[in-house]
Image (cartoon, grey):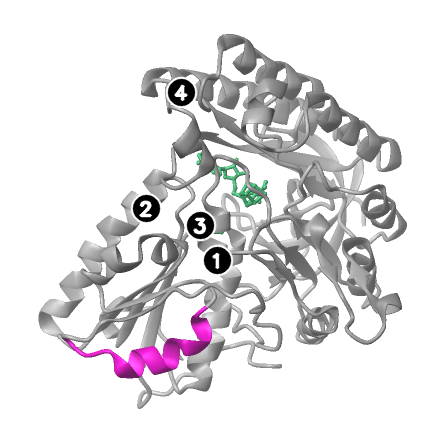
Amino acid sequence: MNNIRPLTDPSKPKVYIETYGCQMNVNDSEVILSILQDAGYVLTEDIAQADVILANTCSIRDNAEQRIWGRIDQFKLQKRNRQNVIIGIVGCMAERLKDKLLETVDLVAGPDSYRTLPEMLKAVAPDRPQINVLLSHEETYAEISPVRLDRNGVSAFISIMRGCNNVCSYCVVPYTRGAERSRDPHTIVREAETLFANGYKEVTLLGQNVDSYYWKDEENSNRNVNFAQLLEMVAKISPELRVRFSTSHPKDISDEVIYTMAMYENICKHIHLPVQSGSSIMLEKMRRKYNREWYLERVRKIRSVIPDCGITTDVIAGFCGETDQDHQDTLTLMEEVVFDSAFMFAYSERPGTLASRKYPDDITYELKTQRLNEIIALQGRMSLKSNEKEIGRRLKVLVEGPSKKNPEELCGRASSNKMCVFPSRGEKAGDYCEVEVVSATSATLLCKRID
Ligand code: SAH
Ligand code: SF4
Ligand code: F3S
């Protein structure tokens, strides 16, 4: 469990990998590299040197897929001079488009098939493309130690579960990633311990719906582990190791999780709680299984237990049949909650989803864009408002490195996940600093040192 940095060896075949989509895909690329490294491959960051070119892809919106089609054309240019280069598409788009991709690339591998990549790569020939898109009920890559791809060796992702059992009507993930399954907690704790021993200071526990994490111990049901208990197990590794998690589902986030967060200083006070819409009518159609009032109650509960908790969200503009009133409901909810930040999207119909079969995608491109722009503009004001509230507060920041704008300054995140910039005293990535917020923009807290 200590292959933190890839080896380099000129005699070994080289693999180049590009990652698209969510943090889970970032972690999956690290798992893929671990599997390929064990099979004798080495990582290259230079596509012109690669024997194998992989793209770990995303299907969440149509534009994510369009981007990949463009990249495939560019990858193929590499074949002009080096015909033996293997081009592989892995991840969610591989799972969704299967044979259609196989017509144009050498290898197609879905998210649960990565253990078979070495065999598949060996079997590839010009007239023999390889495909494996079987989904599994068990695969969690539990004992594989990912080859870390992050640059600064401070913060790492750990997947604690795979797949999703929700059927949000707009979402393709249950089809590309299959059924939900939780990973053995002992392998999660071991992975976090190894990271900490190797100098990492922050781990983010990943799942599509972390609150439904549940590990059943085959021998003793008293040893079953839920998400709150897993959080506690990881938090106990060391007070110097920060613990984050993503994503929480508003229907499932439990009081136990909120109280566990409050109990441990090193569990970061940030919850990514995607609301999607402020309209209960839209939420029903989206099959989110909560309504506006439920969501607002969860936010109140979080803030009553953890007053300074960072809360961020995802919003979809222009879902099927969305009226002006529904849109207004989203805006008023955003004003009421004052999210610290948000990912905001125009609805993109995904073939095969419930929404694509049941509801016409009837909001015009122009109206979706107009509503999305209103949402983005409002969130800009809310981010500023939320950041200005921090002025005068003292924060503990984990240094990520020099600030991009000014090398004399450092940047890093507060527990709430807000980005802070402050004068350097020569600290390096992974050190903790105490700061006080002096002023704020919608994206950053500008701070002075108090340590
Ligand atoms: N599991 C997480 C989110 C996964 S996808 C959750 O349930 O919240 C990340 C975000 O992409 C979603 O929260 C949603 O806002 C957005 N998204 C998903 N499908 C989409 C679609 N068809 N069109 C536009 N945005 C979508
Ligand atoms: Fe998609 Fe819903 Fe699952 Fe999130 S919870 S991945 S939005 S189906
Ligand atoms: Fe995209 Fe798959 Fe993640 S569709 S958002 S890469 S789970």
Q: For this view, does 61 lie left or right of residue 128?
A: right
Q: Cα distance, mark 2 to mark 4? A: 20 Å
Does the Cβ of the disc 1 residue fall within 8 Å of ligand 3? Answer: yes
Q: Earlier in the sequence, mark 3 or mark 4?
A: 3
Stretch of the chain drawn in magenta: 113-126
Please name the amino acid that badge 4 sits on: Lys
Q: Earlier in the sequence, mark 2 or mark 1?
A: 1
The residue to which callout 2 is attached is 65
Q: Cα distance, mark 1 to mark 3? A: 6 Å
Q: Residue furthest bottom?
A: 11
Give the image location of residue 277, x and y in percent: 58, 24
Q: Is residue 384 above or below residue 341?
A: above
Is residue 432 highlighted in magenta? no
- The rendered magenta stretch, by its main secondary structure, is classed as helix
> In the drawing, what numbered circle is on residue 132?
none
Asked whether 19 or 287 is in front, the reply is 287
Q: Earlier in the sequence, mark 1 or mark 4?
A: 1
Quarter of the image that includes the N terminus: bottom right
The residue to which callout 3 is attached is 21
* Label 2 element class: helix
The residue to which callout 1 is attached is 25
Q: Give the quadrant of residue 202.
A: bottom right
Give the image location of residue 315, x and y in percent: 54, 29
Q: Cα distance, mark 1 to mark 4? A: 28 Å
The residue to which callout 4 is attached is 368
Q: Is residue 367 above or below residue 295?
A: above
Is residue 118 highlighted in magenta? yes
